[in-house]
Structure formats: C-alpha cells, structure tokens
Amino acid sequence: MIDEIGRVAHYSSLKNLANILHDKRIKLGNVASLADPRESSLSWIETIGIGHESCPDDLFRASKLKNSVGERLRIFCTASVKDALQRGGCPIESSIYGRPRMWSQYGENSKGFCVVLNHNELNQRMSDLVENPNHLLSGRVSYFDWVHSVQGSIEIEYGNGVKSPKKNLFGIINQNEMLRSIYFKKSIDWVNEEEFRWLLFSESKEPIYVSIENAVEAVVLGCEFPWNQRSQAKHYCEDLGCSGYRLEYQHPRYKLHQVF
C-alpha cells in the first residue's frame, strides 16, 4: 500500500504520460470542458438589460463576457482520502489510486496512469499561480441528493449607464459564494470519488499549468497499461525520483505491485 495521508491522486489517460511525467506539470482544465452538464453549463449566469437604451451590441458584449467565464475558470480535480483508517475488505479499491470507477472514467479504462501527489506541495504551487489569493478556491467536494432542487443565479448587467462588468467579473460571478455552490457541491451519484478540487479564476485565456516537480510521491499504472510503454514510464519515474507501481486484477481482487 502507498501512504495516502497528506496525498491526493490524479488519474489521466496514456496520451498524457509524457505531458505530465516528462514535463513535470499538469494543465488546468476549464469548467466548460467538464463532463458533468451541471458543471459545464453556464445557465447559472444571466445577462440582464438595464434601461431602455441598451442595444444589441451591449447584449453581444455581455453574452461574450458570460461565455468567457467557462474558459477563465480553471479546475484541477483529484481523489482524496476520506478515512484512511476504515478500509474494509477492499483496501486497494477504496484507496485514492485504486478506485475502479476512476480508472474507468478518467484512466482510459485502466490503460492510463495515476499520479499520487503531496497535497501541501501541490497547494503551494497552485497559490503561486495567482496574484490575487481570492481568485483561488480549494476544498473537498460535498455530495447531496438535493442538488437538483437548488435554484439561484447571478446577473451580468448591460445597458446605458451600466459600468463595464469586465473589471469586476470575478466579484460578480462569486456573489454569495456562488462558485463554491456550483463547483464544490455535486450529486450523490459521485460520492465515491471523494474529490478535492482547486478552482482558479484566470485573467486571461492562455493555458495554465501547475508544476508537479518535487510533489510526486508515486505513479501507479493501470491494469491495461501497455507493456511497450513501461520502460518509458520507468524512465520518467526515475527522473522524478519516485516509485512506480502497477495495478493487477486477479479474480476476485485487485493487487498492487511495485515495478520500479
């Protein structure tokens, strides 16, 4: 077993092996690309015309600003430890790096890999990415069976005499901690992911990467990770100074083997 205390895990597909392990960095995705429609949709943002002198150009600019939120909100999702002392009869499958559903959804049906990261180191790297500390939110995701019934939205106003919301866009979209309500609360269906997230508001649309150098504790290869890629994975782990493991399924249980 890999020590999980103070660790989080990020699952990825084989195509990202070099991008992550060789380059020692992970790209923060934008919320518009999330798989859950409840999170990728921007329907919680409304554009509201004020006064009688607003014009189509004002509406266009407001709508464009709304759409930019989906690109400027960057997110990094990891699996976290819920209770390291209660593993039950499936210690591997309940670990942050061995959850079958995570391997299926994010680890390319077990052909990919999982990076186990030091939480404190990663948190510091995230903090270094923003000038305004208020533009970085982090925390555990909470899961509820009533999320579908929660209503509420924020408004981007436009029209004659309305100050440009562009200068205070983060303050507008995060009124009443709306961002935590949208991105740190999920349906009970996702509860076994036990996610810990970082959400960053960017001033630009340029790609953002977080360095994982000196933050990688271990790399775990999936059950179906191709043999012809293992020597490359070994090289990357040696360069990172971390151990490499491989998951294996032998009916009726999963096993973990250190391979380098």
Image (cartoon, rainbow, N blue to C red):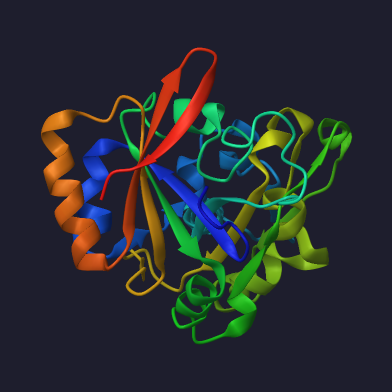
Residue furthest toward the top?
A: 251
Above or below: residue 161 compared with residue 228: below
Q: Is residue 128 visible?
A: yes
Q: In the image, what residue occupies the spot 53% across and 68% down?
A: 201
Along the viewing direction, whichever of 197 and 235 lies nearer the viewer: 235
| 61 on left or right of 25 | right
| 102 on left or right of 227 | right
Measured from the top left, where is residue 138 in percent x and y? 65, 66
Q: In the image, what residue occupies the spot 55% across and 58% down?
A: 3
Measured from the top left, where is residue 45 in percent x and y? 67, 50
Above or below: residue 89 compared with residue 84: above
Q: In the image, what residue occupies the spot 56% across and 53% down?
A: 59
Residue furthest toward the bottom?
A: 131
Along the viewing direction, whichever of 25 and 233 lies nearer the viewer: 233
Above or below: residue 38 compared with residue 9: above
Q: Is residue 72 visible?
A: no
Above or below: residue 202 compared with residue 15: below
Q: In the image, what residue occupies the spot 69% across and 35% down?
A: 192
Which quadrant holds residue 42?
top right
| 194 on left or right of 26 | right
Measured from the top left, where is residue 56 in percent x and y? 52, 50
| 206 on left or right of 41 | left
Measured from the top left, where is residue 220 in percent x and y? 38, 44
**Number of numbered labels in the structure image:** 0
